[in-house]
Amino acid sequence: MNLTNTLELPCGARLKNRIVKAAMSEGIADRHDHATPGHSQLYEKWARGGASLLITGNVMVDRRYLERPGNVVLEDESGMLALQAWSAAGTLGQTHLWMQISHPGRQCPKLVSKEPLAPSAVQLNLLGNFAKPRAMTEEDIEDVIKRFGKSASLAQQAGFTGVQINAAHGYLISQFLSPQVNRREDKWGGSLANRARLLLCVVARIRHEVGADFPIAVKLNAADFRRGGFDLEDSAQCALWLADAGIDLLEISGGSFEHLRLLGDRGDPNTAEDPHVAEGTVKAGYFTDYALEIAQALKGAGKAMPLLVTGGFRSRATIEFVLAQGGIDLVGLARPFCASPDLAHKLLRGEDIPADLHGPLQAGGALHRRLMRFKAYRVLHVQGEVAWHARQLSKLAQGRDSSGTSSMALALVKHMSADMAHAMRRKPPVSGMAN
Ligand SMILES: Cc1cc2nc3c(=O)[nH]c(=O)nc-3n(C[C@H](O)[C@H](O)[C@H](O)COP(=O)(O)O)c2cc1C
């Protein structure tokens, strides 16, 4: 299979090639949590850049709970004009633009909520940035399901050509899937079937809202990479259920805020606290081996569902290798698109990914390796990586050149102050159930 091949999805939509711009939280909403001209500017660049599918960063279903200040929230029709401008820009040149819809659960910073929601009251322990969550009631859960449906239907109305449910990276749906965070004893916890109930209810609700011919994707962890957490076997079983539920695309990633495997962080390299570190069989990208096992499970059960794998692709050869394996249909890249919005065109023309797009995380050296023993250092290091790329995104959104480099430390300070300023500018949250 070639990078330039088209792909027809189960709902009938067609993607023009095999390269996807994966979700990256933009953090540039206005004080009403609406989209801005910056979103249109950014996505027009990416749409002109050749990828077949652009997936937005987290758009939140409830303005009381954000992944970070600056998230767009989609609860009602306010802000529709800006969303329409965003979708028009992001769908230029037959590009698909799918909105990633999300609820952070306990991964909602204190800056946003002093009492976030979670399946159980299990706090995220990360440098004191996250408050103890409240265990959700049955009513909260029903409200969240409705909210996902409502946001998806509004995204469709605004001209987005699909939606992706964020069930990965330790956000709310991923928390329900994880036996470490989900300690419930009712129908939403316990067995995997119970833990996956929220995900499957959200899929069903969205399908009901958007109809049969609108693409629905899910981003799912291959594993949480925590002992006793959601593992590859669970993930493969969820993939089978999602195929039965009729989704159009499953994206495989992994990890959470606690364990940023999604960005290539493999825990303390000195003690291998991560049970998967020792395995190290990855041939290309962070999750290819896992995605291939999931593809195998689907094939073994006689089920077909397009698969996308994202994370760590930094050369054309590895992308081609993955597509040649059979079973994985699309490859997603995120960070390299920050400094090179037209990266997909380069790849489609046969060029490679330039080495200067590999990001600052490559930092090595003996001191760095020693400091990686300390969790606080590791967290700051990876947060610096996220901040550095988030800064590149906001430069692109302002129409500036994103290629200028700044240090990760400086990017982290600027990123944190921007989030703080955003939190202060926001209009006070309004609570209430979605209709
Ligand atoms: C700045 C930044 C923001 C991100 N925001 C999101 C997000 O909103 N939703 C999501 O599912 N993943 C998010 N990710 C993770 C990426 O989608 C992707 O899984 C990860 O960066 C690995 O791919 P890469 O190695 O090509 O960058 C983000 C990553 C970065 C660097």
Image: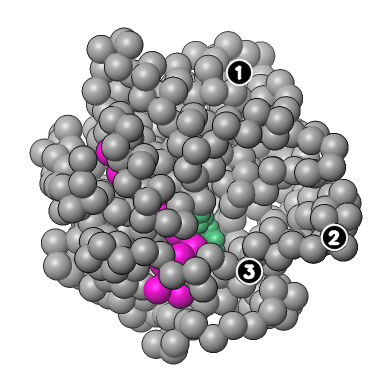
| Residue 56 locus on image (x, y percent) | 38, 59
Q: Please tell me in which quadrant of the rendered image residue 427 appears.
A: bottom right
Q: Which-is-in-front pick, marks 2 and 3? A: 2
Residue 338: x and y in percent read 46, 71
The residue pinned by badge 1 equals: 189
Q: What is the crowding at mark 3: few (fewer than 14 residues within 10 Å), some, or many (at least 20)?
A: some
Can you give x and y, in whole percent of width and height, for residue 333 in the image? 42, 55
Residue in view at x 38 percent, y 16 percent: 297
In the image, residue 424 above or below residue 159: below
Residue 366, numbered circle: 2
Q: Say left or right for 41 vs 179.
A: left
Mark toward the viewer: 1 or 3: 3
The part of the chain drawn in magenta is 329-340
**Residue 332 covered by magenta stretch:** yes
Q: Any atom of ligand 1 within 8 Å of the CB at mark 2?
A: no
In this orientation, which residue lies closer to the viewer: 175 or 381? 381
Task: Give residue 311's position: percent from left, percent from top.
Answer: 49, 48
Q: Residues within 10 Å of mark 2 (few under 14, many from 20)?
A: few
**Labels 1, 2: front one:** 2
Residue 263 vs residue 219, the one in the foreground: 263
Along the polypeptide, which appears first: circle 2 or circle 3? 3
Instruction: Specify the farthest residue to the left.
Output: 12
Name the residue carrying label 3: 360
The C terminus: image quadrant: top left
Quick check: marks 1 and 3 in contact, CB under 8 Å?
no
Which amino acid is tagged 1? Gly
Q: Residue at x 45, y 17 (%)?
A: 237
The residue nearer to you, when weighing 126 against 299, is 299
Does residue 70 appear anywhere in the picture? Answer: no
Q: How many marks?
A: 3
**Amino acid at dot 2:** Ala
